[in-house]
Amino acid sequence: MKELSARDERALRFAASELRRVLRALSIGDLANRIRLDLVGGTQSGYGRDLRADGFAIVPEAGEYRILSRCVRGLVYGAYGFLEWLGCRWYFPGSDGEYLPPRPASPPDHAVIENPDTPYRSVVAFWDRTGPQRQQRIRENLEFAVRSRYNRFYLHWPQGLRSAHRLAWEHGHGLDIGVKLHTARQLLPARLFSSHPEWFRFSDGKRRRDYNLCVSNPQAVAQVSRNSEKLATSLEVDITDLAYWQGDVPNAWCQCPSCIGLSPSEQNLRLMKAILKGVRAVHPRGRVSYLAYYATVAPPQSAGIPKGIFLEFAPHAACYRHRLDDPECPKNAPLVRALRQNLERFGIESARVFEYWLDLALFSSYRSPVRRMPLMPERMSRDVGFYRGLGLAEIENVQWMPPAEAAGSPEVANPGYALLPRLLWNPRQDLAGFLRGFSRNFYGSELASGVLDLVVRADRVNPRYICTPEDRGDGPREAALLLKQAVARCQELEGAVEGRHRERLAGLRGALHYDLTRAQAGEA
């Protein structure tokens, strides 16, 4: 084996320790002594030639098992792939999301080769600013990302970022670590407003110190470049495709006489050019993200997009009742047109999509208490296929790490957490089979998949996810009927299972009952 970096050594030790831990818990600890983790070259004959980046092979040889990959990260995935072959599953972050079968299956008796379909499978994690046990939750999410075969982990919150970043380096186990931050205020601090109000955006007849800046002011733009350089220097990351984004609001751009003729997209492009200049002083080959989001979803029309600026498309305004590529959907059809237009302007090579399928904050309307997320396996499957069909090599999923008291709640226990990374790895998933397995392992009865099927159907017509007011139709009534059946089935199944399985079903029933009462009242 070639000489490894300290991080690779740590990841390899983690893979070996996880094999020992889980196999001991399955009462077959001796099996760990018959498993080898080996790196192979990509040009040599045999399995190495068949493996792509992050791929792995499990090869039985005379009562022993070799796990092979071209990279250490692939060996970590291979270790978990071997455990999955025995029947182990990881559905959610934390110990409650781990399933170890009481009677493990036999290891494979033939060579197994797995390669990922999506080259860059990314989770964007953000957390509450003041909640307890934050570091523990970050560690749990990092380990869950590895077990789910994500390969990029982006930190998405400025408070406590440096301590979180250190944890990511220590517990990432092969993940590439990056950042995604709304930095407009950090790059032009509000404290400068009193001395340089002309640097800040003009709106409703006066200069304002919030959100974005005046991109027509050369001094303001130069200050952004200098602070971008400082920020890039202060954060050590693996991924130098940096996301230092505009203010996180629908439309807060400058309307001064010099900027009024510039669309939000043009202003955003100017901002990214200033940021790129600062980033390149630290990372000569670094790039920055143009976030197509809210008012900047339409592509900029000016010529001369630098090669160092790539597209990051965020369909925040999507409708979740219809598939993204539904040409008849009045919300999604314009988004898809905008995506195609942006790809024409920026190119496909480094473009990526920033998705919200598992954004608990979005589906809770950014309010407490958290609400149950919609269950939409077909929608996720079709969307992943659509994005890959366009040629997008990186698909990002924003995932909120909820407060500790909600981390194991039924509102958070959405099987999409485990399904999505499987779709990114291999889009040819048996969705119904996955839900049956999840129901059997997590709720203690395969019959619970009938409850989940009712939930999927209810969420399609739930007024929380309607496309337009005219689309509401009989949605509340249909959703209420389906949810009423789901609640009743949950209650029946609770009598057939015990312990933690019963508690989980009772929790699911409570979350569904809350949605039922709102649907019956005609509320979202």
Image (cartoon, rainbow, N blue to C red):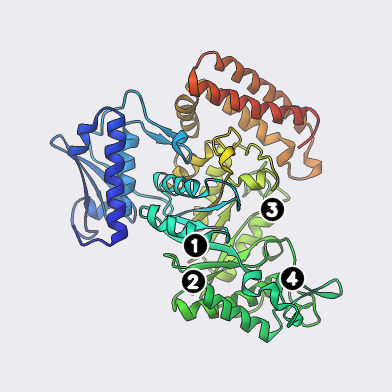
Q: In terms of image quadrants, where is residue 276?
A: bottom right
Mark 1 secondary-structure assignment: helix
Query: Which-is-in-front pick, marks 4 and 3?
Result: 4
Give the residue at mark 2: 234
Q: Amino acid at mark 3?
A: Ala
Left or right relative to 104: residue 320 = right
Give the residue at mark 4: 253
| Inter-mark Cα distance, 3 to 1 | 31 Å
Residue 6's x, y, as percent?
A: 29, 60
| Inter-mark Cα distance, 1 to 2 | 9 Å
Give the residue at mark 3: 317
Name, please, the residue furthest toward the bottom. 218
Query: Which-is-in-front pick, marks 4 and 2?
Result: 2
| Inter-mark Cα distance, 2 to 3 | 33 Å
Q: Amino acid at mark 4?
A: Trp
Comes first in the chain, label 2 or label 3: 2
Residue 412's x, y, as percent?
A: 58, 38
